[in-house]
Amino acid sequence: MKGDGKQGNPRTAQAGVEYLLIMALLLVMVTPIFIYAMDMSSISVRTSRSRQTVESIAIAADNICGMGGGSDAIGVYIPYGAEYSYIKQRTIKLGLRIGDGVGEAIAMTRCNVSGQIPLDEGYASVPVRMLQNGTILVG
């Protein structure tokens, strides 16, 4: 009946409030762990993609060098945070921003290489060709 003056059981209400507080506390504790795990996963994917990018370019350069000339265009994925590329002598590097620092993905080639890798995030078609002097031009 309405208005008969009877209240609900206070122990049930207290248990409900305690349950809500425990759940809120668990959520506050689990959220930073989840955010940290997502950040580490993102870094792992980005470093793997940057390594795969430089290795793909190095393989294409070695193939053209081995054939004694020619050209090719390879599709690569440039990850978020690409800071710089270095392609000189027999080294291909892609610098990647990781937290407060920069990590590098490095691949070595059999022939001298020069050029640049595009730094815009996403898929890119990178031309690779041999110059008259025998150097492989990337980009």
Image (cartoon, rainbow, N blue to C red):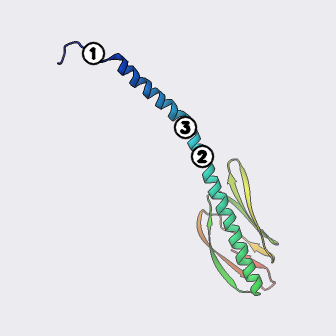
Reply above or below: 86 against 68: above
Q: CA distance from mark 3 to mark 1?
A: 36 Å
User: Amino acid type of disc 3?
Assistant: Val
Which label was assigned to residue 133? none
Q: Nearer the viewer, mark 2 or mark 1?
A: 1
Q: Position of residue 15 (x, y in %)?
A: 40, 22
> Which residue matches tag 3?
30
Residue 130 makes an appearance in the image: no
Q: Amino acid at mark 1?
A: Gln
Position of the N terminus by quadrant:
top left
Residue 72 lies in what quarter of the image? bottom right
> Mark 2 highlights which residue?
37
Q: For the residue marked with disc 2, what is the amino acid?
A: Ala
- Labels 3 and 2: the sequence-earlier one: 3
- Dot 3 crowding, Cα within 10 Å, few <14, some 14–19, many 20+: few
CB atoms at circles 3 and 1 under 8 Å apart?
no
Left/right of residue 104 with respect to residue 12 in the rendered view: right
